[in-house]
Amino acid sequence: MKNKKTHLCAIFGLLLLPAGMSAQENAAVSGNLALTPPMGWNSWNKFGCNVSEDLIKQTADAMVKSGMKDVGYQYVVIDDCWQVSRDAQGNIAADTQRFPSGIKALADYVHSLGLKFGIYSDAGSKTCEGRPGGLGHEYQDALKYAAWGVDYLKYDWCNTSTQDAKASYANMRAALDAAGRPIVLSICEWGKHQPWLWGKEVGGNLWRTTDDIQDRWEGKKEWKPGNCCSYGVMDIVDVEAGLYSYAGPGHWNDPDMLEVGNGGMSDTEYRSHFSLWAILAAPLIAGNDLRNMRSEIRDILTNREVIAVDQDPLGRQGQRVRKEGDLEVWAKQLSDGGRAVILLNRGNAAQKMVVTWEQIGYPDHLNAAVRDLWEHRDLGKMTGQFGATVPSHGVAMVTVRP
Ligand code: GLA
């Protein structure tokens, strides 16, 4: 039976199901992706449309040299503007001025460093920057991406008119699977159609939950009058707080790419931004210039202990367990039964803060080991609570282990 099916596929289905695979076998292609939140870099936050093969190669080099690869960063993703047109057969064409060696050669280079390669397109007729979108070319593009060696696709939502979001992303996942290469699917429809409700079902590995991040601590800002809004770090965190139940291995809420190192926030705020993304089990996609990082920025992005919280195999997204005005306690259950805890001070002056064991799901009589993940220091065994003085816009981040 199986052989017969494969045979028929080979005759009639070559375009849709290359290598004679059944739909079930196809789904298995992408079944084990992103079991922990994806880590990597994306060009958009720092470089916008100013992308080129030199930038991508230098960034991949820097990802290795800076030690980021060693702590788990993997995907090097070109965002919008690498593509300029389609040829007479409808094949997507890269900008030959900016990518003179072609995308395949670039992917090969990234792979030669032991890293993975990602690219960007859009579910609609055009990307957000007006480049050709994927609509009507999903299977053709997926085959091209697979031939190039693409490992990660960010699929945007501009110029989608009346398209159905769930069906559009399901279609692209089916196309990627039919191409036979395991490709992470990053759904980027900004939370407009509640992708946390259907993203997993359609084979999305991560889904954006808000409009774009910008490099600031808090406050939404209209893009232009009447067109709302870019988000600050605190605005995104407030949305994520209600979405913890939807995240898990293979399917993550995506609070957008990191702004750490882009210059709009203090190092204290960047440390908070990174800590919160980790406790949210968010994809850690750096968005700064890796070729020119201050050591303080590199130390934030490569903090192994904070990254371990993000990458914990249980795959729980942390929850806001306490909020009293500007003071918040966040907690994430870890696979060994421990907790990661953040004391976050959103206010304008330093504050003494306390977390009780009861707030993080332990009995108050419990004696537990507390370790500071930014000081890299064991603070000893504590009973019932932990307290710290937290600077304005800062965090204390610890693990608590019975
Ligand atoms: C949208 C996305 C951004 C980025 C740009 C590119 O705004 O949300 O992350 O990909 O498009 O044009």
Image: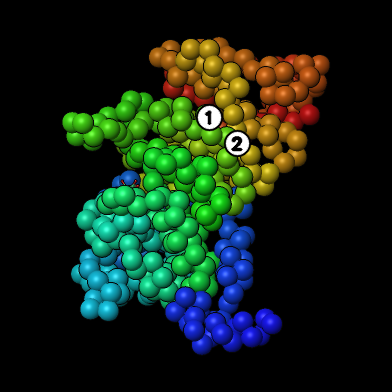
* Vertical order, 98 against 286 (above or below): below
Q: How many marks?
A: 2
Closer to the camera in the image, 333 or 23: 23
x 25%, y 71%: residue: 86
Amino acid type, mark 2: Ser
Amino acid under disc 1: Gly
In this picture, is 322 found above or below 16?
above
Q: Residues within 10 Å of mark 2 (few under 14, many from 20)?
A: few
**Image height of 94 relative to 291, above or below:** below
Q: Quadrant of the N terminus?
A: bottom right
Give the residue at mark 1.
242
Image coords of residue 385 (percent x, y)? 70, 16
Left or right relative to 107: residue 184: right
- Mark 1–mark 2 Cα distance, whole angstroms, equals 8 Å
Name the residue: 47% across, 75% down.
16
Question: Looking at the rendering, in which quadrant would you find the C terminus?
Answer: top right
Residue 36 x/y as whole percent: 60, 50
Mark 2 lies on residue:
245
Place of residue 152 in the rendered image (x, y in percent of width and height, measured from the top left):
46, 60
Instruction: Return the residue nearer the eye: 31 or 6.
Output: 6
- The kind of secondary structure element at disc 2 is helix
Q: Residue furthest left?
A: 225
Query: What element does badge 1 sit on?
Result: loop
Identity of the residue drawn at 35% across and 57% down: 123
- Residue 84 appears left or right of 287: left
Pinpoint residue 83: horizontal percent, then vertical percent: 27, 65
